[in-house]
Amino acid sequence: MTTSTPDGGRGTRGSGAQLALRVTAAVLGVATLAVGAVAVFVTENGAGAAALIAAGVALAVIGGVFDRIKAFEAAGVKVELAEVREKLATAASLEEAGQPELAAELRDEAIDLLSSSSPAALRFKQVRATPPGWQRTIELERQMHDWEEEARRVAPSLATLERGFDQGDEAGRAMALAMMVGAPAAASPRVAEAAIAHPRSAFEQFHGLRVAQTIARSAPAAPTTIALGEVVRENLEQGRFGSPDSDRCTLAKRILELVAPS
């Protein structure tokens, strides 16, 4: 049975209630997706974050908006849903085909995608692409400072930051290093060593040294800190930190004073 709509058309009975349900589901879906995206940054509970994301997807589908959402932004995280949607759909197909391991990998990639393209990271890339100079340095250091402050607020896990460094592009690696300085409990000696001994740029090497300094201040006598100090000493002696009066050389000497005080 049909009923007349206010504009003279014909609609099914209860369509108003259905519309309200779809709108509510759509709003809740996007909100839940946002919470799941932010959870990727601040928790080691990947399953919990994935569950939030999956719930958000389900609600958005019920609301009829998921296919039409290209991207949304929450807490500085820009989520590209088209690619997320494709990965989740492929993961579901693989699960049904009896390939749970591949499905899990794709779900992990979908979650990682939710944390890989924040506006701050995009700005970092844009600034890095400009000609070298004091203005560029100031802008880059301002962004590193902002990431440090964000880490103090959200307290990211060591595992999350290590993954961000290992799998990230230049901006992702820089963000991980800055956040390790802001959250000393999540500072990784392994990541610091990689940034110091095998940096992608002098900028990255400097901030790897800053992570090493953070670790040395927190645990100067720890075996991992002493080993990291040896990496710093070796690179300093081999002239890998630039001229003797460079910021990197100065910082390296300060680290060695912390690790092996005279």
Image: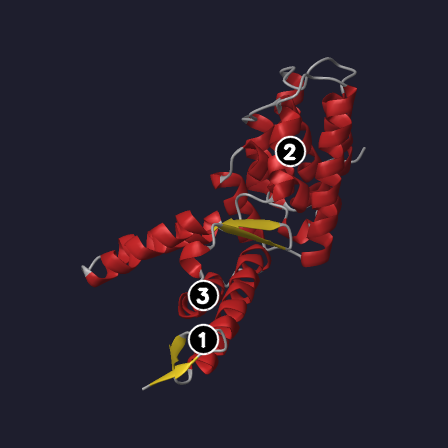
Frontmost residue, 75 versus 59: 59
Any mark on residue 166, and which?
Answer: none
Residue 60: which disc? Answer: 3
- Mark 1 vs mark 3, foreground winner is 1
Q: Quadrant of residue 230?
A: top right
Residue where numbered disc 1 is placed:
8
Mark 2 element type? helix
As drawn, the label of residue 124 is 2
Q: Residue at x 65, y 41 (%)?
A: 120
> Is residue 256 visible to us here?
no
Q: Determine whether the residue tagged by mark 3 lies in a helix, strand or loop.
A: helix
> In terms of sequence position, does the residue under pointer 3 or pointer 2 come before the other?
3
Separation of marks 3 and 2 at Cα, in angstroms: 31 Å
Q: Of the residues shown, which amino acid type is indicated by label 1?
A: Gly
Q: How is the image coloured?
A: secondary structure
Mark 2 belongs to which amino acid?
Phe
Residue at left offset 79%, top offset 16%: 245
How far across and down, in percent of the image, does residue 144 sit? 71, 38
The residue lying at 63 percent from left, 51 percent from top is 186
